[in-house]
């Protein structure tokens, strides 16, 4: 079977190209993973096909350990997005070939090409999705000839090159659309970039240009993108070609952009019929992050330890579903500042999306950078409960399951294997987090520290959290007890006992 490429498309899918090869580069994008390709890039392609944007994307690999570039380059950066699910009561099952990406680059090997792209006169947008871990500050040395390791470092250095290339022209600033699920993500990115300017002594004039002529938008993104399907042969037979980057997504999508008139005029998403709102992010963020993303983070490790592999498989299990619904009803919804009917309606929609039989949303994908996800998505909810034992138990069990999940088999690598309850899974976290968790579990296995001491060390470590998790000794004991339960009696009995206990407490 022939592989997807421009040469192949010109023979059999020429209508899909529609002159896209001639469109100028308008977007520089750091992050080439499934989500951006199935969400933002899909939207750009959607606008291009309606003649509303007429620009293409250069995708940049965010870390030295990326694996997508060889496949992107082998397919001329084309790929397929398969939308499957239910939207507005209608079944959707549609394949779109996406040609929005014109080139893809490894900045650690092709920094000069990335700089040249950043200095393109047609460039207007800088988009990103580097996960929550990407929007953090780290000290770095200035080296104009090489890519910084951090994402904000790349932004600062590329902006400086663009500033010099156009002599600080006011009309050459960029619109930033960070798609990381971090509160006030645009401000966070801008603040770290400004710190980089200070670190590297790039000058007040450049700093003024960054502040006055570049727009750092706050954003909120919402679409479940599960990526490469397990039953790929079935889809290749249906499509008639091989695509190693085929990604599956739900039909539902929401993109909220808090920015000025320039962003809405440059990116006419709404004119293309896309579900995009130019509005204050806070109007949408709390419901989405707390009732969609927080439940994902609270349940993924627990369900994986139970023996499940996907969100859909987990939702079909009575014990896991009972935990998830209990967490939403008892621990999350009561502390959200919305009307009861609005919260219930949104939560019901979330559960319906989790139950999408067309989606294979892998729990191990949800577990990438889970420590930081727990801190940004779940911990703010935990802090709102001062006395209610039922609610706080849900958070304690969720954190215990994550600590058990994070048992690395080796350290000092960004991506390693984990081994929890004899299930081997990929772990993706920062090197310092992997190293710390490895050392903690190694000390526990050697019986040098107790489970309670392991939990205390994890909660107190401000190298893996932005700040230590402060809970009283009673709650620390709860977490330690749940960790011990997972280790000694297994996830199934632990969850069943937990659900029975919470049912009694509520009654």
Image: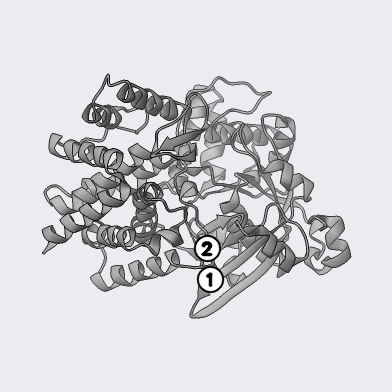
Q: Can residue 402 be seen in this view?
A: yes
The tag earlier along the polypeptide, 2 or 1, is: 1
Instruction: Determine which of the numbered discs, if any, sits on residue 85 in the image.
Output: 1
CB contact under 8 Å: marks 2 and 1: yes
Toward which corner of the image does residue 373 lie, by quadrant?
top left
**Residue at the disc numbered 2:** 359
User: What secondary structure is found at the residue carrying circle 2?
Assistant: loop
The answer to whether residue 402 is left or right of residue 145 is left
Which residue is at the front of the view, 256 or 287?
287
The answer to whether residue 334 is left or right of residue 402 is left
The answer to whether residue 135 is left or right of residue 8 is left
Residue 461: horizontal and vertical position, in percent? Answer: 31, 27
Q: Can residue 471 be seen in this view?
A: no
The answer to whether residue 397 is left or right of residue 423 is left
Residue at (60, 58) in percent of width and height:
38
Decide: few, some or many residues near mark 2? Use Cα within 10 Å; few <14, some 14-19, many ≥20: many
Q: Is residue 179 above or below residue 253?
A: above
């Amino acid at each position: 079977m022939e592989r997807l490429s421009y040469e192949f498309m010109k023979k059999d899918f020429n209508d899909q190209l529609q002159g896209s090869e001639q469109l100028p580069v308008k977007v520089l994008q750091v992050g080439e993973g499934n989500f951006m390709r199935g969400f933002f890039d899909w939207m750009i392609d959607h606008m291009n096909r309606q003649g509303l944007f007429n620009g293409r994307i250069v995708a940049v690999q965010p870390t030295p350990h990326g694996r997508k570039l060889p496949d992107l380059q082998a397919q001329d950066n084309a790929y397929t997005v398969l939308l499957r699910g239910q939207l507005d009561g209608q079944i959707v099952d549609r394949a779109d070939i996406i040609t929005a990406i014109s080139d893809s680059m490894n900045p650690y090997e092709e920094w000069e090409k990335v700089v040249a792209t950043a200095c393109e006169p047609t460039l207007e947008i800088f988009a990103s999705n580097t996960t929550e871990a990407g929007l953090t500050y780290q000290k770095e040395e200035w080296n104009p000839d090489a890519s910084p390791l951090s994402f904000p470092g790349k932004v600062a250095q590329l902006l400086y090159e663009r500033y010099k290339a156009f002599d600080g022209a006011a009309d050459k600033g960029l619109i930033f659309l960070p798609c990381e699920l971090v509160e006030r993500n645009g401000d966070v990115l801008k603040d770290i970039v400004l710190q980089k300017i200070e670190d590297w002594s790039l000058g007040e004039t450049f700093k003024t240009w960054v502040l006055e002529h570049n727009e750092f938008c706050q954003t909120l993104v919402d679409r479940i993108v599960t990526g490469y399907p397990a039953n790929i042969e079935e889809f290749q037979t249906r499509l008639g070609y091989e695509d190693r980057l085929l990604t599956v997504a739900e039909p539902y999508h929401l993109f909220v952009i808090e920015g000025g008139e320039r962003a809405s005029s440059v990116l006419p998403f709404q004119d293309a019929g896309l579900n995009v709102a130019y509005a204050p992010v806070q109007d949408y963020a709390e419901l989405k992050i707390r009732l969609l993303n927080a439940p994902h983070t609270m349940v993924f490790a627990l369900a994986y330890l139970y023996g499940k592999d996907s969100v859909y498989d987990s939702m079909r299990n009575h014990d896991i579903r009972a935990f998830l619904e209990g967490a939403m009803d008892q621990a999350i919804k009561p502390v959200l500042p919305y009307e009861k009917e609005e919260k219930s309606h949104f939560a019901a929609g979330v559960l319906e999306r989790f139950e999408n039989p067309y989606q294979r949303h892998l729990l191990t994908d949800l577990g990438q950078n889970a420590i930081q996800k727990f801190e940004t998505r779940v911990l703010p909810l935990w802090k709102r409960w001062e006395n209610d034992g039922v609610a706080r138990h849900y958070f304690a069990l969720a954190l215990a399951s994550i600590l058990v999940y994070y048992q690395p088999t080796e350290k000092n690598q960004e991506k390693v294997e984990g081994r929890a309850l004899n299930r081997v899974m990929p772990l993706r976290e920062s090197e310092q987090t992997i190293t710390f968790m490895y050392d903690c579990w190694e000390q526990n296995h050697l019986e040098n520290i107790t489970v309670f001491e392991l939990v205390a060390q994890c909660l107190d470590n401000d190298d893996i959290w932005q700040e230590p998790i402060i809970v009283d000794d009673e709650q620390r004991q709860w977490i330690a007890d749940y960790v011990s339960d997972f280790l000694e009696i297994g996830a199934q009995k632990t969850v069943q006992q937990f659900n029975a206990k919470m049912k009694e407490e509520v009654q």
